Image (cartoon, rainbow, N blue to C red):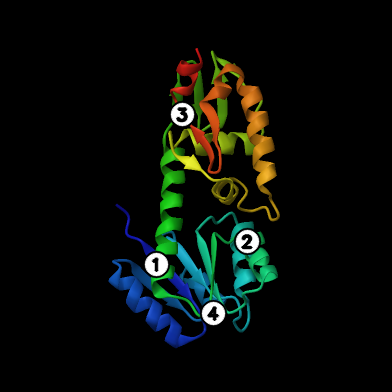
Amino acid sequence: MKEVQILVVDDEKDICEILGFNLENEGWSVVIAHSAEEALAKLSADTSLILLDVMMEGMSGYQLAERLRKEKNRVPIIFLTAKDTENDMLTAFSVGADDYIAKPFSIKEVIARIHAVLKRMNVKHEAQSTAHLTFGDLSIVLNSKEVFIKEKELALTKTEFELFVLLASNPSRVYSRDEIIANVWQDTPYITPRTVDVHITRLRKKLGDYGTLIFSRTGYGYQFDPKGYEMEL
């Protein structure tokens, strides 16, 4: 298993030392940078996640995140910042943040959030590394991003495909609308739960009889159940 390496980026050395000590106690490797420019120099293929301050001299944390996303770098980013208004949070997610924690923060909360983001990314990686997902005559080809029913390709949009893969890769797990938004629309601000409902409806329609594989759990969200098709028949 690949070692987890956390890149901590903050111009306050005391915060870096506290985070470094506690994250290493969690069993993770820690790399420290005191500016966005230094972070770019220390960022590598081994970096598993970035804990990123916003307000720093020179390039800001927002600018660093935006630059990485424009370069198609998908390393998870959690902002740690004293800027805690709703607009600050929306800005963070709009530039590609995976999570946002306001200062002052609890070390336990930071560690819990890191675990959650890493787990989510591992699920994505495992789903992408599998060549096919097959359910009866329904086949999802992950590498070519195609879906077939009895060898007939379905005309799914990029968002519909990603939504379907998220649910189908984790059979029987219930995803809340907020979790779906965080996974499928992570680069798009201002997505509402209603948007999720609309896409689920369209996806079900395109799946035809296989639309019964996706069903809603009132008060919770949506679930993919491989037995759904068999039950309907």
Residue 100 in which image quadrant: bottom right
* Residue 129 position in % (x across, y down): 42, 38
**Residue occupied by mark 4:** 35
Secondary structure under tag 3 reads loop
**Residue occupied by mark 2:** 93
Q: Residues within 10 Å of mark 3 (few under 14, many from 20)?
A: some
Answer with mark 1 or mark 3, whichever residue precedes in sequence.
1
Q: Residue furthest front?
A: 219
Q: Amino acid at mark 1?
A: Ile
Q: Nearer the viewer, residue 137 or 4?
A: 137
The answer to whether residue 186 shows anywhere in this view is yes
Q: Amino acid at mark 3?
A: Asp
Label 2 and label 4: CA atoms lie apart by: 20 Å
Label 1 and label 4: CA atoms lie apart by: 22 Å
**Residue occupied by mark 1:** 111
When the figure is inspected, residue 3 is found, relative to residue 36, above or below; the finding is above
Residue 90 in which image quadrant: bottom right
* Residue 87 position in % (x across, y down): 70, 69
Which dot, 3 or 4, sits closer to the camera?
3
Lateral position of residue 212 relative to residue 136, left or right: right
Answer with mark 2 or mark 1, whichever residue precedes in sequence.
2
Lateral position of residue 231 relative to residue 83, left or right: left
Answer with mark 1 or mark 4, whichever residue precedes in sequence.
4
Answer with mark 2 or mark 4, whichever residue precedes in sequence.
4
Task: Report the residue at 54% width, 29% height from top.
Answer: 214
Label 3 and label 4: CA atoms lie apart by: 46 Å
Secondary structure under tag 2 reads helix
